Each structure stands twice: as C-alpha cells, then as structure tokens.
Image (cartoon, rainbow, N blue to C red):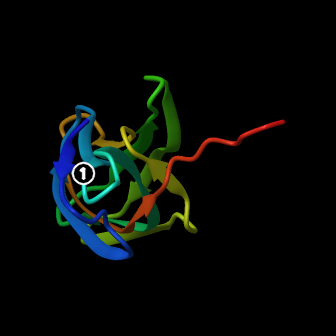
Amino acid sequence: MSVIRTPRPPLNLFEAVRAEIGPAWAPIYEVPSYLIPANGPSPERSIGAAVIMTGLLVSNTGFADISFSARIVGRDGINYPVLLEATVPPNDFALIGLDRQVMLSGEALEMRAGDAQSAVVHFTFILNQREEFEVITP
C-alpha cells in the first residue's frame, strides 16, 4: 500500500484513472494511506482514505466483441468480484455504474479483459479522508 506524507489528507478530490487492460488481472487503482506529520500538540498519525466509486467505462475500439471482469482486492487479501465476463460489442463501450461503492486504504480495484483481448478503462471516483476512530465503552 502506498503511503503519502502530507499535512492534509484528501477531502473530496475528484479523480480519474485511464488504463489499458489485457488478459491478466492488473491493478487499476490502489487506495493510499496518508501520514500526517506532527503539528503542534498533535502527534504524527496515519489517516486512511476512502474511494467513493462513481463508475467504470470500458471502451472496445476493436472489430470483435470483448469481455472484461473487475474485482476488489480487500485488505484481507480476498478477491471480491464486482463484475465477471461482461461483453462489449465492437466500437462500443460499457458504462458500469458503481452507485457510490467504497474502497478503503489498502484495497485495490483490478480488471482484466478476455483471452487475447484488450480494452481501455476509465475509472472515476472521489478520494476522501476517513478518520480512524476508537469507540470507548464503559
């Protein structure tokens, strides 16, 4: 997991990632963690981030149907399928609305195309801080 050292964690940063995918699972985006340096009486601390996913657009610029799959790799190392073997006709695209699903620091979105296929993925999201907190019980 990448760690970004900064005085301020992200707050509603609108981001986009564009990548080409092939037949092997490839990371599209990994949610970073933020290290906030000591400031005044506040100790140096880590703050997690959350990616609020808005959508995936998969473009097929070829002359034959392609298929693609997407999954989230959790912090526990388990793969959670988002979409398996969706089809996109030639010279067309698929828009997958993710309806504000969330990924946390250390989780990654991975995608792949079918055998001997490729596609271009456009992944849009909002990167936002999330404070870790501890519930104190009596």
How many marks do you count on the picture? 1
Where residue 45 appears, x then y in whole percent?
Answer: 33, 45
Where residue 57 appears, x then y in whole percent?
Answer: 34, 68
**Left or right: 54 as drawn, with respect to 137:** left
Label 1 Cα neighbours within 10 Å, binned few <14 / some 14-19 / many ≥20: few
Indicate whether 39 appears above or below 55: above
**Where does the N terminus fall, quadrant-wise?**
top left
Indicate whether 7 appears above or below 22: below
The part of the image, by quadrant, that contains residue 17 is: bottom left
Question: Closest to the observer: 105 or 67?
Answer: 105
Where residue 88 appears, x then y in whole percent?
Answer: 37, 60
Residue 54 visible here: yes
Indicate whether 68 appears above or below 54: above
Residue 117 visible here: no
Q: Residue at x 32, y 76 (%)?
A: 14
**Left or right: 134 as drawn, with respect to 103:** right
Q: Residue at x 16, y 56 (%)?
A: 19
Report the residue that reaches farthest toward the right: 138
Q: Amino acid at mark 1?
A: Ala
Q: Residue at x 84, y 36 (%)?
A: 138
Read off the residue under disc 1.
38
Question: Closest to the observer: 70 or 16?
Answer: 16
Under circle 1, the secondary element is loop
